[in-house]
Image (cartoon, rainbow, N blue to C red):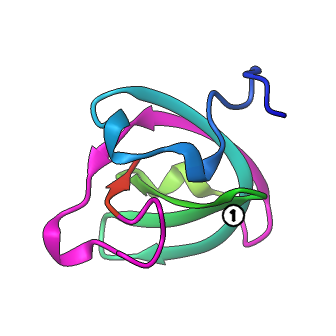
Amino acid sequence: MFFVNEYRSRRCAEVLIAHVGQPVRIAGWMENIRDHGGVLFADIRDSSGVVQIVLHDDKMLDGVTRESVVSCDGTVSLRSPDTVKPKIPTGDIEI
């Protein structure tokens, strides 16, 4: 059973294409951080699954390492067609 709280409004795998344009807050473990020259991509994992977040300010991850526990909020958006991951439920979106 899941209850909305101050740390998250949805579990990671519950953020879907139907939520595009809506604000969400997720919480979980930092699974992976990728730097693509000015844009950071991070995968956040909880017991339900994984969702990708996009950050345009690398200072937001100062001191954050893999397996750090984080809570983040943002607006759900569609991934560009060349970055869609059809093998995971959240593969069409990012926050």
At mark 1, the secondary structure is strand
Q: Which residue appears farthest toward the front when viewing the image?
A: 1
Instruction: Decide if residue 63 is on the left or right side of residue 39.
Output: right
Q: Quadrant of residue 29?
A: bottom right
Nearest the eye: 15 or 61: 15
Q: Residue at x 28, y 30 (%)?
A: 21
Q: Which residue appears farthest toward the right when viewing the image?
A: 1
Identity of the amino acid at label 1? Met
Q: Residue at x 44, y 34 (%)?
A: 74
Nearest the eye: 9 or 58: 9
Q: Residue at x 50, y 30 (%)?
A: 24
The image shows residue 93 at horizontal and vertical percentages of 34, 54
Task: Count how many numbered circles sit on residues in the image.
Answer: 1
Residue designated by label 1: 30
Q: In the rendered image of this protein, does residue 14 appear above or below residue 73?
A: below
Instruction: Decide if residue 84 is on the left or right side of residue 27.
Output: left
The image shows residue 40 at horizontal and vertical percentages of 41, 65
Instruction: Decide if residue 77 is on the left or right side of residue 87.
Output: left
Q: In the rendered image of this protein, does residue 41 appear above or below residue 37?
A: above
Residue 25, magenta (yes or no): no
The image shows residue 87 at horizontal and vertical percentages of 44, 79
Nearest the eye: 37 or 16: 16
State which region is magenta.
65-91
Q: Residue at x 25, y 74 (%)?
A: 83
Q: Quadrant of the N terminus?
A: top right
Crowd class of label 1 (few under 14; some 14 to 19; many from 20; radius 10 Å) = many
Nearest the eye: 54 or 8: 8
Residue 70, magenta (yes or no): yes
Instruction: Decide if residue 34 is on the left or right side of residue 80.
Output: right
Q: Quadrant of residue 79?
A: bottom left
Q: In the rendered image of this protein, does residue 22 appear above or below residue 15?
A: above
Q: Which residue appears farthest toward the left when viewing the image?
A: 81
